Image (tube, grey):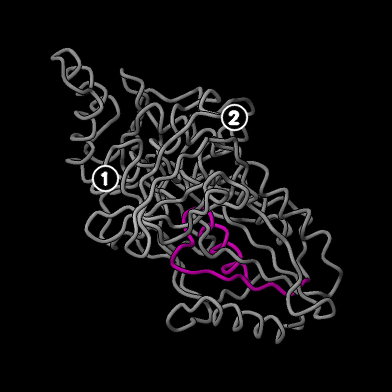
Amino acid sequence: MSGPCLFVQPRRIRRGAALTLIFVSVLATGAAVGSWDAEAENGHGPAADRIPAQAVVGSVESDEVKAAAAAAQQDGKSGSQAAREVVSRSGDRWGAVYSAREYEGFRRNLDGVYVGTGISARLGREGRIEVDRVQPGSPAREAGIRAGDRLLTIDGVRVTGRPVTDVVARLRGRADARAVGTSVTLGLRRDGHSRQETLHRAKLATEPVTVDRIGGPDAGAVRIKVDSFTRGSGERVRRAVRQVPAGEGILLDLRGNSGGLVTEAVTAASSFLDGGLVATYDVRGEQRVLDAQPGGDIDSPLVVLVDGGTMSAAELLTGALQDRGRAVVVGSRTFGKGSVQMPSELPDGSVAELTVGHYRTPAGRNVDGEGISPDLAVKGDDGPGAEARARTVLSGLGGGS
């Protein structure tokens, strides 16, 4: 990927396990977190084939990371491990080093397609690995695996205490289509009982955008749920908005949206704006702008529903609609990931992601570390309660209930 990125990294977070949980959910379900679509920016692709040689971040540069990796390899040591140590010392909160297999997974995730078992994992207490979600129609669902099950082993290897990225890589197997049909044996525990399940990996597709009516067929409101901004999701939002009858309200549900391609988020913003500014961002101090395309729906009542799992590109969209006065934002403060990363390939094929800048909302608000505060906060971030409140607000705007 050659352009700036808004990747959410699974490292050094001081807000509990939330970041790791979101990141692993991304890898396991095929969603993608906060990547820049360099094809759209540069006019040709694929984006991941043009990794830049240098990306400056604070006191560390990608050349420095590369040099450390190369020196370690010459000494017979792990180049990627040496790179991780350099990035860790740099103080780059979002900086990270990924294996070639992990990064290949990102590339596939951007298309909303992946090979795996359908398990979304999370880090639990005392290093436990737990099943967070199970994708419908997946091998895991067919085997009766459920959210909350504890994952003990993968092919006989204990996973407790292991990095969640390693766990997901083991669930997926080799990072190409040859993994389809290969088997993986899982050791699981539920309600004090242990068992083993052997699954066969399959090619799975995610549906990042779903549309339904809320409150019944005559309620006059449509819910557009966006789980992530994978490739094509922005256009799906645009089509959904165009199909909303005149005068009906729209509930844009971005809860748990861990981000995605920034250009897709801008396309989604264009669905609700008639041109104008969506966000600004800087790369090594150089200011740039992101503008909406003209012709969006500026009349339908709009409420955006967010929570602490609304991240990165989803925050960019939320901030744009809020600052432009286009939507009422309901829920709880969003995650607060507004930094820009650029990837750099290391000698062993692994990839270092280093922070090079930040983006801001149209009103100039910084998102990184701050998040987006809703116009109407819902105490306790109760899921059903938040949605009920959002529907009430939408009804008050004249958009049904």
Please name the residue shown 38% across and 22% down the image.
53
Residue 256 x %, y % = 50, 61
Residue 66 x %, y % = 26, 23
Specify the quadrant of the image occupied by residue 347. Answer: top left
Between residues 97 and 158, which one lies in front from this camera angle?
158
Residue wearing tag 1: 92
Residue 310 lies within the magenta run: yes
Residue count near mark 1 (Cα–Cα under 10 Å), binned few <14, some 14–19, many ≥20: many
Q: Relative to 206, does residue 202 appear above or below in the rendering?
A: above
Q: Earlier in the sequence, mark 2 or mark 1?
A: 2
Q: Is residue 19 visible?
A: no
Residue wearing tag 2: 42
Q: Amino acid at mark 2?
A: Asn
Chain part drawn in magenta: 300-325
Q: Give the distance between the C-alpha atoms of the residues marked 2 and 1, in whole angstroms.
A: 27 Å
Q: Relative to 158, does residue 44 appear above or below in the rendering?
A: above
Residue 99 lies within the magenta run: no
Q: Is residue 22 left or right of residue 77?
A: right
Q: Identify the residue at the far left of this view.
A: 75
Q: Is residue 296 visible?
A: yes
Q: Amino acid at mark 1?
A: Asp
Mark closer to the observer (2, 1): 1
Q: Secondary structure at mark 1?
A: loop
Please name the residue shown 57% across and 58% down the image.
317
What is the number of callouts on the image? 2
Q: Quadrant of the C terminus?
A: bottom right
